[in-house]
Amino acid sequence: MKIGVVGLGAIGAQVLWSLSKRAGVEVHGFESGYIGHPLAGAGGEGRLFRNLELTTMGYMPIVKRSDELWEELELTGGRQLRRKIGALLLGAPTDAQIEHALQAAREWDLEHETYGIEEMRDLFPQFSMADGDVGIWDTGAGVISPERSISVAVEQAVRAGATAREFTPVTAVDERADGVTLRLESGESLNVDRVLVACGGWTTKLVPELRDWIVTRRLTSAWFSGKDDSSLRGLPPFMRVAPSYCYGIPNADEKLVKLGLGFNDHLPTGDPDSVPRKFGHKEAQAEIEKFSWILRDLLPALDPNPVRLETYIESYTRSMHEFMAVAPGRSNTVVLGGFSGHGFKLAPALGEIGADLVVDGSTKFDLGFLSAAKPVFSITDVNSGITTHNSVVASTGGEK
Ligand SMILES: Cc1cc2nc3c(=O)[nH]c(=O)nc-3n(C[C@H](O)[C@H](O)[C@H](O)COP(=O)(O)OP(=O)(O)OC[C@H]3O[C@@H](n4cnc5c(N)ncnc54)[C@H](O)[C@@H]3O)c2cc1C
C-alpha cells in the first residue's frame, strides 16, 4: 500500500515513523518547510510532557503508550528528547482539572505527590500562591525538545525506508475512485492509495470540509528572566489550571522561563500564511500586557519585560479534542488535526493511531471519547477564525 503523509510537524513526523515500521507500506512524507522548523506548532525548545490527564480518562492509554514510544524513539535515535524532571500542576482543589489529575493518578497508579499551600511555599518559593491553592507533583513529567524530536522521528522513518521531502508544500489532496492524487506546488503530482493530512493550523486549507469544526490561532510565547541570577533556581515546569490558566517551562540553565497563555488570548486567523508573525512595538506592548497578571499574581520574581517573544500556529477543534478520522465526505483521506494545545506529549501514540487509521481503517485505541466530546465554543466566522469565548482554558487575568 502506498501512503502519503502531508505535514511533517509534531504529529506527521510520528505518523511517518510509525508507518515506516509497517511491512508492506510504502510511505512518502511532504513538508512545506524544513524538518523540525519552528514556524508552525513546534518550536520554542520546550513542550510539557504530563502523565496526569486533566480532562478525560479516555486519554490515559494514549499518554501511557506515548511515554513508551518517546523512550523507544530516544533509544533508536540515540539522542535525548525529553528531560524527565517532573512538573507541578497548580490549582484550586475543587477545580475539575485538578480532580481529574488526581483520578488519573489513582486509577493508573502514577507516581505523584500532593502539596498543600504551606509545603508549596516551602518547596517552590518562586511562586506567590493564593491561600487554598494545591499542587500536584507529576514525577514522571518533563520537557520535550520539540524540534529535535521531529527531526529524529523523520530521520528514523527515512532510515527504515520512508521518503521525506522538505520544502515541498502540497497544494491539493484530490480523491479519485481508487486512491488520492497529491498535487505539489512544484507542479508535480503523486498518486497514492491513501493519504494522511497532519497540517496543524493549515489543515482546513487542504480539507475545507472541516472548516466548521477546526480553527487556527497564533500563539505567543514569552521568555522572561529573573530579577537576579538565582530567582529562577529550582523553578519547575508548571501548569496552572485554576483560577486562570497559564504554564511555564524554565530553560535548562534556569535563567529564563517561557510562559504561555490559553485559547482566548491567542489571535484567531483564517489564514496562517498571512497572519503577522513579528511584532511592531504596539503589538508587542499588547502581547506583553496579556502576561502581566502572571508576573503580578504568580511569579513576582520575574523581570517585567520579556527577553524574547515568538509566535506559533496551532489548530483547535470546537470540543478541544482532536479530530482523528476519515475526512467528512471522503474515503481515502484521514485527517489528524485540532490538537488544541496538547498534542505534543501524545504525538508518538497519535502517530501510531494515525498509522492504524490510514492502513487498517481502525485502531485498537478506544477513541469514542473524542467523538462524544461536546463543543465548548462556536465559530462566529470561518473566514477570520473568530470564535465565541472558550471557558476550558481561560487565562485572562480579568477572569479570575
Ligand atoms: C506555543 C505552543 C505551546 C505548546 N505547548 C505544548 C505543551 O507544552 N505540551 C503539549 O503536549 N503540546 C503543546 N502544544 C501543542 C502542540 O505543539 C501541538 O498540538 C502540535 O504541534 C500539533 O501538531 P500538528 O502536527 O497538528 O501541527 P504542527 O506541529 O504545526 O505540524 C504541521 C506541519 O504541517 C506542515 N504543513 C502545513 N501545510 C502543509 C502543506 N500544504 N504541505 C506540506 N506541509 C504542510 C507545517 O509546515 C508543519 O510542519 C503547544 C503548541 C504551541 C503552539
Image (tube, rainbow, N blue to C red):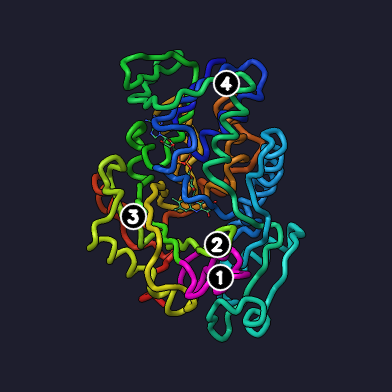
Q: What residue is disc 2 on?
A: 250
Q: Is residue 172 above or below residue 203?
A: above
- In the rendering, at what x and y percent does residue 111 appear? 75, 62
Q: CA distance from mark 2 to mark 4?
A: 35 Å
Q: CA distance from mark 1 to mark 4?
A: 43 Å
Say which amino acid is labelled 1: Leu
Say which amino acid is labelled 2: Pro
Local crowd size for mark 4, using a 10 Å CA cut-off: few (<14), some (14–19), many (≥20) = many
Foreground tag (2 vs 4): 2
Local crowd size for mark 1, using a 10 Å CA cut-off: few (<14), some (14–19), many (≥20) = many
Mark 3, secondary structure of its residue: loop
Q: What residue is disc 1 on?
A: 232
In magenta segment, residue 10: no
Q: CA distance from mark 3 to mark 2?
A: 34 Å
Foreground tag (1 vs 4): 1
Residue positioned most to the front? 229
2 or 1: tag closer to the N-terminus: 1
Q: What residue is disc 4 on?
A: 162
Name the side, left or right, on which 217 lies relative to 374. left
3 or 4: tag closer to the N-terminus: 4
Mark 1, secondary structure of its residue: loop
